[in-house]
Image (cartoon, helix red, strand yellow):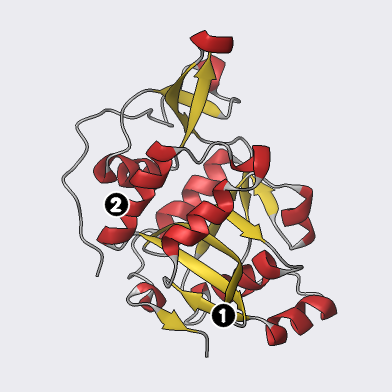
Amino acid sequence: MPTEPPPSHWVLPDLDRLDPELADEDLVGLGADLEPGTLLAAYRTGLFPMHVAFGTGGDQSEVIGWWSPQPRGVLPLDGLVVSRSLRQSCRRLRTTVNHAFDAVVEGCADRGDQGRWINDQIRGAYRRLHELGWAHSIETWQGDELVGGLYGVSIGGLFAGESMFYRVTDASKVALVRLVKDLGADGRPGLLDVQWVTPHLASLGATEVTRAEYRRRLALALPTPPQAAWGTASDAP
């Protein structure tokens, strides 16, 4: 069972009482911290953090931004599109759970501009969540080489995907196939949050829902018992 940290002393944006000017914006708040209690409170209400840069040149600074995309990207557990070539990759590559969390985060951070948001603060924050049993990684291996993976936060039936990476063809997709398989293993009301739908995720079956619909699904998913697959590091069957 994950360890519940001390509660946050910050008041995060209330998505039921947003200023009308923010109703259709993705960025709904600034500030606070990245302590475990703050992060869990955010995910439980439908928020996630990503730093926002202000200023230019040497005067540039970053502050924590709180995001609730409108619309929100989700991947239905019964809607994952697995092509013939991806099935072949799943047979060729091996997956594990929670064997190399830090290495997966570093792999995601190394994705050029797409990984720049994974700064030292983000690394430390999700490492603490991992140590408490809330953040998890799925690794993809080719032999003994880490060639892809993903990480995110699991609360009840929610898995909030943060980032993924690959070094060989389909490696991140293979990790996603493992994730969907584990989340849907016992027919639970799972919710796989992908934040925004990119063309890559759309090709795998990701869809967009309104903020209100996302929060409705979130309310159903959160009370679900924690996913057993996250309990200990494990190899693929």
- Residue displayed at 60% across by 48% down: 110
Residue 41 percent location from the top left of the image: 31, 43
Q: Is residue 152 above or below residue 97?
A: above
User: Residue under circle 1?
Assistant: 144
236 displayed left or right of 220: right
Residue 99 percent location from the top left of the image: 42, 73
Name the image quarter holding residue 132: bottom left
User: Residue under circle 2?
Assistant: 128
- Residue found farthest to the bottom: 237
The local crowd at label 1, few if under 14, some if 14 to 19, many if 20 or more residues have their Cα within 10 Å, is: few
- Residue displayed at 77% across by 68% down: 169
| N-term-proximal mark, 2 vs 1 | 2
The local crowd at label 2, few if under 14, some if 14 to 19, many if 20 or more residues have their Cα within 10 Å, is: some
Work out how far the residue at label 2 is from the one at label 1, CA to CA, in angstroms. 26 Å
188 displayed left or right of 169: left
Mark in front: 2 vs 1 = 1
- Residue found farthest to the right: 84
Front in this rendered view, residue 14 or 128: 128
Q: Is residue 62 above or below residue 200?
A: above
- Residue displayed at 60% across by 25% down: 24
Would residue 172 be visible to someone looking at this image? Answer: yes
* Label 2 SS: helix
Residue 69 percent location from the top left of the image: 58, 36
Tag 1: amino acid: Asp
Q: Is residue 212 above or below residue 177?
A: above
Would residue 55 be visible to someone looking at this image? Answer: no
Tag 2: amino acid: Arg
- Residue found farthest to the left: 6
Circles 2 and 1: CB distance less than 8 Å? no
* Label 1 SS: loop
